[in-house]
């Protein structure tokens, strides 16, 4: 199927990691039920892959190593940057 | 003051008694105050100072304060004359109102004259805590934080704790165990004394004001309720209730319950649990789960096409297979018919053969029957004839048979005369004899 013919909501960026995971679970359940037709299956797989990519990117953002900042330093920086 | 000096006498309020001498009024005021009921007060000691004869301090809580004084000998009796009465201590004092009217040079002074003082016990604090808890619950302040959305995977969290506390180390270790490597913004604050609650409140507000902060942890280690009392501060707890960012509290140990636990979005027993509540997602497990998802989706996509193509293939082969099946059935029928036909022919041949055998046997028997009778009669005659010619029949009539030594018949006189011995066989037995020779005689 042409990409432009797909439901736009299916390819929309999820609001959050938990929203993405929730939708992924729905997709897996639907696929596991065996009731999805070929077209729906391929659409769901495409959407699922996008969600997996999104979730992986979200995990990557907190996967680089813990970063520690001090509120005092941030406040001092703000004050020094103020005109 | 300017206005008072310039005001004419008629401007004072008409109809009031006086004017009295202020010293007289001051002494009457002192008497009136001292007659007020004696009570107990509980609060935090601040601004402790001492003179030669008494100690001064303020007794304070979030709602207000009262200036207090206690004679040093009363303080000594209470056992708090050393450093016992110090800033930040929660105490219960007994006494009543007092007023020092001053004098020509001395300033007047109002105070609550304490005659007894003791450090607040667990029971006192619990009673105060329960009263606060009841009031704040009635105001609905315990529900506000719990209605906030808590993201499962925050990128940045704020933490309010003591800079050198063990809680800091435990929290970091727990975050790293979950594979979370986001940003921690530390809002270090004292966690025990009268400066703690305002400092914690300020740090919380500053952290909540930062847009990247998605959750805030407030934590400290265990201690007595007096040690944890800063976390029961009404102002602090009201501040927490109104924050837009969810607050996870982990103050003291499991058995300790402070007011901040009630107002926070989540109350935890340890810094480790607080880390898990602030970052609910175990990132290591999530990565594994995500990989399984990706594999599952790939298989589902490939499987959907594979299954259907196999199904289509099967459908395409259907007509040929049906034809083959029908051909097989037809062949089977043919084999069955052939077998049946063969069985029918064989049966008929066998029947014919059986009928022929019976007919022939009957004919044979018919043919043999007459011949046999004739043969039997001829045989009987031959037997009778043979019997008539048997030597025994002759011997029965009185004849004798001459036989040699070996039983051979001697049929002439010459043979009998030549034999050494002879045997005469009669029908009833034998007689041996020796022939006589004429010449020898």
Image (cartoon, coloured by chain):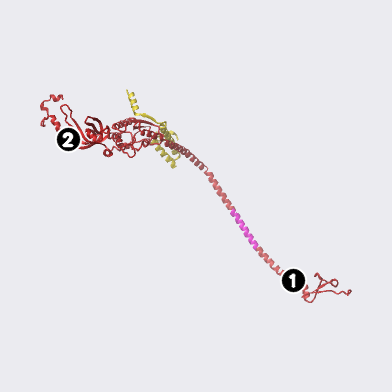
Chain colours: A yellow, B red
The residue indicated by pointer 1 is B383
Q: Residue at image x 58%, y 51%?
A: B335
Q: Is residue B419 above or below residue B308?
A: below
* Front residue (pair B89, B251): B89
Please identify the quarter of the rendering in which residue B51 is found.
top left
Question: How far across and how far down the image is residue B382, in percent?
Answer: 75, 70
**Other residues around mark 2 within 10 Å, as few (<14) / some (14–19) / many (≥20):** some
**Other residues around mark 1 within 10 Å, as few (<14) / some (14–19) / many (≥20):** few
Q: How many angstroms separate mark 2 from mark 1 (CA)?
A: 183 Å
Answer whether residue A16 is magenta in the image: no
Please state the extent of the stretch shown in magenta in the rendering.
Answer: B339-358
Determine whether, in the image, residue B65 is placed left or right of residue B300. left
Q: Of helix, strand and loop, which one carries label 2?
A: helix
Name the quarter where the N terminus of chain B is drawn. top left
* Front residue (pair B421, B75): B75
Which residue is at the far top?
A83
Please identify the quarter of the rendering in which residue B158 is found.
top left
Instruction: Name the mark on residue B34.
Output: 2
Question: How far across and how far down the image is residue B354, in percent?
Answer: 63, 61
Asked if one can make out residue B166 in the rendered structure from this viewpoint, the answer is yes
Q: Chain of mark 2?
A: B
Question: How far across and how far down the image is residue B228, in percent?
Answer: 31, 35
Please identify the quarter of the rendering in which residue B147 is found.
top left
Q: Of helix, strand and loop, which one carries label 1?
A: helix
Answer whether residue B354 is magenta in the image: yes
Instruction: Name the mark on residue B50.
Output: none
Q: Chain of mark 1?
A: B
* Front residue (pair B399, B275): B275
């Amino acid at each position: 199927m042409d990409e432009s013919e797909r439901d736009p909501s299916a390819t929309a960026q999820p609001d959050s990691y938990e929203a993405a995971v929730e939708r992924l679970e729905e997709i897996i359940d639907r696929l596991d039920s065996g009731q999805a037709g070929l077209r729906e299956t391929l659409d769901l797989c495409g959407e699922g892959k996008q969600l997996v990519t999104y979730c992986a990117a979200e995990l990557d953002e907190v996967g680089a190593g813990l970063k520690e900042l001090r509120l005092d330093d941030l406040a001092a920086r703000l004050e020094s940057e103020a005109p | 003051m300017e206005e008072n000096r310039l005001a004419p006498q008629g401007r004072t309020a008409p109809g009031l008694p006086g004017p009295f001498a202020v010293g007289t009024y001051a002494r009457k005021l002192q008497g009136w105050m001292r007659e007020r009921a004696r009570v107990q007060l509980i609060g935090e000691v601040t601004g402790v100072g001492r003179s030669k004869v008494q100690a001064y301090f303020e007794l304070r809580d979030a709602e207000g304060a009262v200036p207090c004084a206690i004679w040093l000998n009363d303080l000594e009796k209470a056992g708090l004359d050393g450093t016992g009465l110090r800033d930040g201590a929660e105490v219960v004092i007994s006494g009543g109102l007092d007023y020092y009217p001053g004098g020509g040079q001395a300033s007047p002074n109002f105070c609550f004259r304490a005659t007894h003082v003791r450090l607040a016990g667990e029971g006192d604090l619990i009673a105060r805590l329960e009263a606060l808890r009841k009031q704040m619950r009635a105001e609905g302040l315990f529900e506000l934080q719990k209605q906030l959305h808590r993201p499962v995977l925050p990128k940045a969290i704020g933490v309010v704790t003591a800079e050198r506390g063990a809680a800091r180390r435990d929290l970091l270790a727990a975050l790293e165990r979950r594979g979370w490597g986001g940003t921690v913004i530390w809002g270090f604050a004292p966690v025990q004394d009268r400066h703690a609650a305002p400092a914690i409140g300020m740090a919380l507000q500053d952290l909540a004001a930062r847009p990247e902060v998605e959750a805030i942890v407030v934590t400290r280690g265990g201690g007595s309720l007096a040690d944890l009392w800063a976390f029961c501060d009404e102002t602090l707890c009201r501040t927490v209730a109104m924050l837009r960012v969810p607050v996870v509290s982990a103050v003291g140990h499991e058995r300790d319950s402070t007011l901040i636990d009630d107002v926070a979005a989540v109350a935890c027993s340890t810094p480790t649990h607080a880390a898990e509540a602030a970052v609910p997602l175990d990132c290591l497990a999530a990565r594994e789960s995500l990989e399984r998802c990706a594999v599952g989706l790939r298989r589902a996509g490939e499987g959907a096409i594979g299954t259907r193509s196999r199904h289509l293939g099967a459908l395409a082969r259907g007509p040929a297979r049906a034809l083959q099946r029908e051909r097989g059935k037809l062949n089977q029928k043919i084999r069955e018919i052939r077998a049946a036909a063969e069985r029918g022919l064989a049966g008929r041949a066998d029947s014919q053969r059986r009928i022929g055998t019976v007919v022939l046997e009957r004919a044979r028997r018919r043919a043999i029957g007459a011949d046999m009778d004739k043969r039997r009669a001829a045989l009987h005659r031959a037997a009778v004839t043979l019997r008539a010619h048997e030597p025994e029949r002759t011997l029965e009539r009185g004849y004798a048979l001459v036989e040699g030594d070996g039983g051979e018949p001697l049929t002439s006189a010459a043979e009998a005369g030549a034999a050494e011995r002879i045997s005469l066989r009669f029908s009833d037995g034998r007689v041996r004899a020796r022939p006589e020779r004429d010449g020898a005689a």
